[in-house]
Amino acid sequence: MKYTSQSVALPYFIAAIGLFVGQIVFGLAMGLQYVVGDFLFPEIPFNVARMVHTNLLIVWLLFGFMGAAYYLIPEETETELYSPKLALLMFWIFLIAGAATILGYLFVDYNTLAEMTGNNILATMGREFLEQPLLTKIGIVIVALAFLFNISMTMLKGRKTVISIVMLLGLWGLAIFFLFSFYNPGNLVKDKFYWWWVVHLWVEGVWELIMAAMLAFVLIKVTGVDREVIEKWLYVIITLALVTGLIGTGHHYFWIGTPGYWQWWGSIFSALEPIPFFAMTVFAFNMVNRRRREHPNKAAVLWALGTGVMAFLGAGVWGFLHTLAPVNFYTHGSQITAAHGHMAFYGAYVLVVLTIISYAMPLLRGRAANSQRAQVVEMWSFWLMTISMVFITLFLTAAGILQVWLQRVSDTPMPFMQVQDQISLFYWMRLWAGVVFAVGLVTYVASFFVKGESKPLITP
Amino acid sequence: MSGTFTKAMARNIFYGGTVFFFLLLVALTVDTTTNLHKSDNSANLTPQVVAGKHIWETRNCIGCHTLLGEGAYFAPELGNVYPRRGPEFIKAWIQSQPTGAPGRRQMPQFHLTDQELDDLVAFLKYTSEINAQKWPPNIEG
């Protein structure tokens, strides 16, 4: 750690990991509800558990992104953070608002929560991933603006590197596109159309900028490859991401009441969306192969390479599988979608946040790298989580193919719930894979507490 | 990447490409918005339908069901539930939840009034008449 203000990243990373644990607890509960339907009913119905699962994911990734920005922006711009105090204040506001929202989901009836929090003044709730009460949404905007102010002011007084510019572009985009969550017209088609301006333009747009910038930062640090080379790659990757991803939004506009031409625009451009992810994989391996030094933090290198591979598989390959309109006609809204969602989020965003945490956390704790033993435990957690996620994805894909066949393709289509009974074996297998994932996560958390002789920090 | 392809070129292609394709997305969005009335069934978008959408949202139906294929995959697609089941069945079904059948997936009891049930059904009827390019493939959703 070169600048003392980078240390504000530490609470952000800790909160991210804590909320990640919460996300997986609810994921397991839902996995069980898929096969034992009345589990936890009526205390925690599936829709509540799902809201907690997905919202925790979004919030902890945002904690990860903000922590990453607070860590890498001072180092990139070669100046102290504009206001570490503001960063800490925003941390507590975001954490308390986030926790209050989750507790609200769990302990207050959703309709009552909506009435209590001003949903009748401006109705924004009850839409997938945007279930947050109006007050929480406003809170997110305030925290995001204060955060962006802090980061932008830091950058204005410091060196403007490509990594910091791309990171900042991505974060500004994140905040700007979130504003569409306040637009909820009575016309369902319009509602759905602009809902994707948040969801798609986040995960298949500006988040890719944030991800690529974070990955590039870690790769410079652990490989020692020339910045010029890495920054050129970074531009190429994000160009590919936005050129394909912007019009790629169209793959969500096939069957929601929008004009038919989106089937062409969406299919063609989203079919190209794997390319930036493939470029990212090649980039990560290429840089590690051309490394000019052996960084003592081997675990961070593993997470970085894992991000490249898993993002390509989850977002790229599993996305392509069902993105062409004639295929999507059958697979839309099936377990195939769930399979893709799981591996894409894990491969791209979970892994990139864990990559930067793996790199930065030892430095924040005053050492160059963790002890050998701690790194071995951390690498075990990588493999446990990654392999179990591959199996979760494979089981859901198998379930999805059967579901599509029985319910949509066959000459004698079966009703939804009858099909669900037929494919329950795969849901059981998914649940067991989920248990292994949870074991991997516990291992991950444990790796922070493994003692041993760590590499001392030598400031050059 | 060879020496002839410089970082400045990469940067210019990024900004140029992003601006171009973002403007293309905006242009397509404008065209979609102008022509949306042909497919979005807005002719039948009554205040009752809007009230029904509000019921749909404040009970977090999307947390279990899909609507035109979007949402959660725990419970049946409801974009075409109106032609599949009809208004009376839908209302009776909502009122009789949860079934309490051991081990089966359960839907909460929402204590909707008759008016709210009618609003919700109106919303589901309107939704089923949106031109979704012949999706879903069959009545089972």
Image: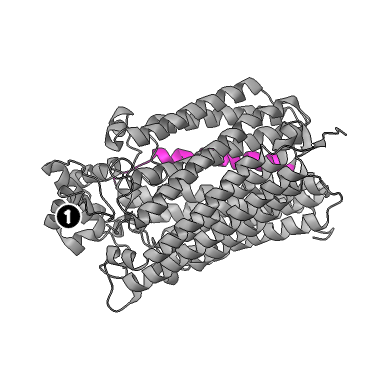
Give the amino acid at mark 1: Ile
Label 1 Cα crowd, 10 Å radius (few <14 / some 14-19 / many 20+): some
Looking at this view, is A397 or A41 the one in front? A41
Question: In the picture, residue A68 is in which quadrant?
Answer: top right
Q: Chain of mark 1?
A: B
Residue A460: percent from left, percent from top? 88, 34
Q: Is any part of residue A81 visible from this angle?
A: yes
Q: Which residues are magenta?
A: A162-186
Helix, strand or loop under label 1: helix
Q: Is any part of residue A208 visible from this angle?
A: no
Give the quarter of the figure containing the N terminus of chain A.
top right
Left or right of A19: which side holds B57?
left
Tell me the residue at 81%/58% (across/down). Answer: A289
Q: Which residue is mark 1?
A: B90
Tell me the residue at 63%/62% (across/down). Answer: A275
Looking at this view, is A357 or B129 the one in front? A357
Tell me the residue at 55%/49% (across/down). Answer: A439
For the stretch drawn in magenta, the main secondary structure is helix
Looking at this view, is A34 or A148 the one in front? A34
**Residue at far top of view:** A85
